[in-house]
């Protein structure tokens, strides 16, 4: 009988993991949310706001992949992702346990609708998000092009609890204090970025679903801006299916039209994140 060589974990990963990238950092925010960074393929080019397929090898020997928005901007040397933890989720139940040095699968074919090319020129950009739907906006608000195209950028982020807003708050604060962006754009441009967090369960300075706050007009009075106007406002939406549909109805009710890469208009919605991979 021919002696079989033992397969180490390292050599096994090299053999079975296609499009492998190495995890470089992991941060856990709550028992439901975490973020991680990984190496970036040298050939990968993407527009801020796009997503890729990432995952791990399944028990059946086949890649188990989900769509994940790239949370890092297009100029970053690494890639960042923001994820929910689903206890019985096929992918996230395992992905939440990755550590620096582990490998993940990353298919380097970025796509998505939450990009500047899918919007007509405007003056005010609204970024509407719930939960991990903030991820593509973490990329966009760190991209100089966003500040060059708009006079005002308003990020709304709605979660159940205050702790679930930590990631978005830290990103916004980092943008405003980033020395490189400050030198590149200037303080006046960075001042265009405004943050409007709300919670639906735990008490916080601003309570309520953003959809209700739009309907009541409270968000506009809070921010000192006029109601949605298709001549001025542009929107990007990323959240649950119900949230996406509700925001879409409100935007269309205000006269804004849904756009796409092939036909830019006043707002766009990312539909790829409904489910575990949000």
Image: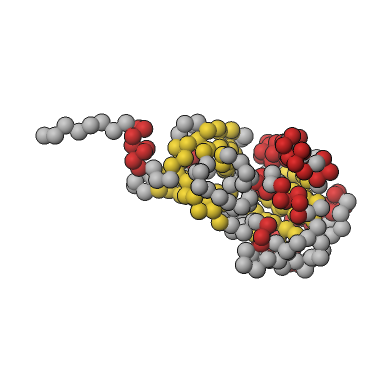
Q: Where residue 143 sits in the image (x, y, percent)?
A: 69, 47
Q: Where residue 72 sits in the image (x, y, percent)?
A: 62, 43
Q: Residue at x 33, y 37 (%)?
A: 12
223 sits left or right of 167 in the view: right
Q: Residue lying at the far left in this picture: please name it.
A: 1
Q: Residue at x 84, y 60 (%)?
A: 227
142 sits left or right of 35 in the view: right
Q: Residue at x 33, y 34 (%)?
A: 11
Q: Where residue 48 sits in the image (x, y, percent)?
A: 63, 50
* Quarter of the rendering occupied by the N terminus: top left
> Along the line of sight, which residue is nearer the eye, 180 or 150?
180
> Along the line of sight, which residue is nearer the eye, 172 or 40?
40
Instruction: Give the image's coloring scheme.
Output: secondary structure
Q: Quadrant of residue 268?
A: bottom right
> Along the line of sight, which residue is nearer the eye, 166 or 77?
77
Q: How many marks?
A: 0
Q: Quadrant of residue 250?
A: bottom right
271 sits left or right of 104 in the view: right
| Whether residue 171 can be seen here | yes
Q: Where residue 7 sits in the image (x, y, percent)?
A: 29, 33
> Along the line of sight, which residue is nearer the eye, 249 or 20?
20
Q: Residue at x 76, y 55 (%)?
A: 149
Q: Quadrant of residue 267?
A: bottom right
| Whether residue 191 can be seen here | no
């Amino acid at each position: 009988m021919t002696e079989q060589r033992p397969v180490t974990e390292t050599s096994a990963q090299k053999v079975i993991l296609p499009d492998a990238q190495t995890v470089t950092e992991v941060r856990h925010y709550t028992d439901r949310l975490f973020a991680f960074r990984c190496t970036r393929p040298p050939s990968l080019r993407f527009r801020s706001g796009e997503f890729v397929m990432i995952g791990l090898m399944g028990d059946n020997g086949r890649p188990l992949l989900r769509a994940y928005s790239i949370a890092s901007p297009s100029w970053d040397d690494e890639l960042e992702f923001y994820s929910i933890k689903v206890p019985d989720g096929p992918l996230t139940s395992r992905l939440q346990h990755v550590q620096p040095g582990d490998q993940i699968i990353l298919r380097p074919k970025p796509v998505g609708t939450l990009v500047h090319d899918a919007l007509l020129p405007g003056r005010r950009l609204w970024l509407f998000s719930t939960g991990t739907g903030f991820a593509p906006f973490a990329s966009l608000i760190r991209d100089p092009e966003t500040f060059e195209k708009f006079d005002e950028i308003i990020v709304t982020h709605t979660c159940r609890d205050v702790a679930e807003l930590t990631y978005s708050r830290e990103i916004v604060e980092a943008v405003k204090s980033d020395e490189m962006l400050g030198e590149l754009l200037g303080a006046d441009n960075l001042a265009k970025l405004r943050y409007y967090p709300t919670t639906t369960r735990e008490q916080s300075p601003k309570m309520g679903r953003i959809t209700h706050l739009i309907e009541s007009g409270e968000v506009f009075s809070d921010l000192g801006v006029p109601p949605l106007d298709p001549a001025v406002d542009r929107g990007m939406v990323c959240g649950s299916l119900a949230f996406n549909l509700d925001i879409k109805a409100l935007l269309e009710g205000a006269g804004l039209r849904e756009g796409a890469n092939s036909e830019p208009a006043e707002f766009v919605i990312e539909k790829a994140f409904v489910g575990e991979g949000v």
